[in-house]
Amino acid sequence: MATTRDRYGLIKIVKKLEIFSELNEEEGLHILGLCTRRAFECGEVIWNPGDPGVDMLVLITGKLHVKDDQGQLVGQVLPGSSFGEMACLTGHDRFVGFEAVEASTALSLARASLRALISMQPALYVKILETTIELLAHRVRRASSGAAVRTEEGQPGLW
């Protein structure tokens, strides 16, 4: 059993992750229990376009580049951001790829674990689903507004 201090530290981390920011302490700890930790080396391809959507990830450390099916850089993922949600929720194949541009770690939430929440904890599933829809809507609005693909420093924009 985690100590109060450990629980507090875990909840602090969860609250910084945009996709889990609306969860209470109990919900956050439950979701963390469903996640697995993944580590990626610099240059490692996490997913290619067309790969199956079996999980979604939340970047904890490092930086990723997002590439379209032509290999063109279309964005970047920074710590605290989730990615792969659409394929995970729909079960469809990935439409973009992700590559670590520095050593990175992420939490992985499997589609099967997420789907199991529908019957076990439907209110928690709905919270995650609503937050995910908001995140995806924000990405669509940003893309359709013609937001610059590159920042002033020449870095790709956030995914």
Image: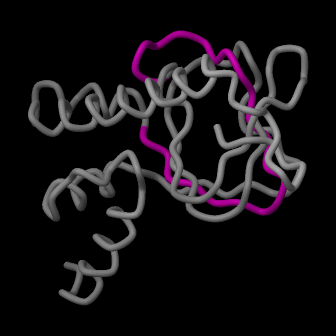
Residue lying at 67% horizontally and 15% vertically, measured from the top left: 95
Q: How many discs appear?
A: 0
Q: Position of residue 14 (x, y in %)?
A: 35, 62
Q: Is residue 120 visible?
A: no
Quadrant of the rendering where the C terminus is positioned: top right
Q: Quadrant of residue 53?
A: top right
Q: Position of residue 40 (x, y in %)?
A: 74, 54
Residue lying at 21% horizontally and 87% vertically, measured from the top left: 3
Residue 60 position (above or below residue 141): below
What residue span does the magenta drawing correspond to?
A: 88-109
Residue lying at 42% horizontally and 41% vertically, measured from the top left: 109
Residue 141 position (above or below residue 56): above
Q: Position of residue 27 (x, y in %)?
A: 17, 54
Q: Quadrant of residue 72?
A: top right
In the displayed structure, does residue 23 sit left or right of residue 33? Answer: left
Residue 129 position (above or below residue 103): above
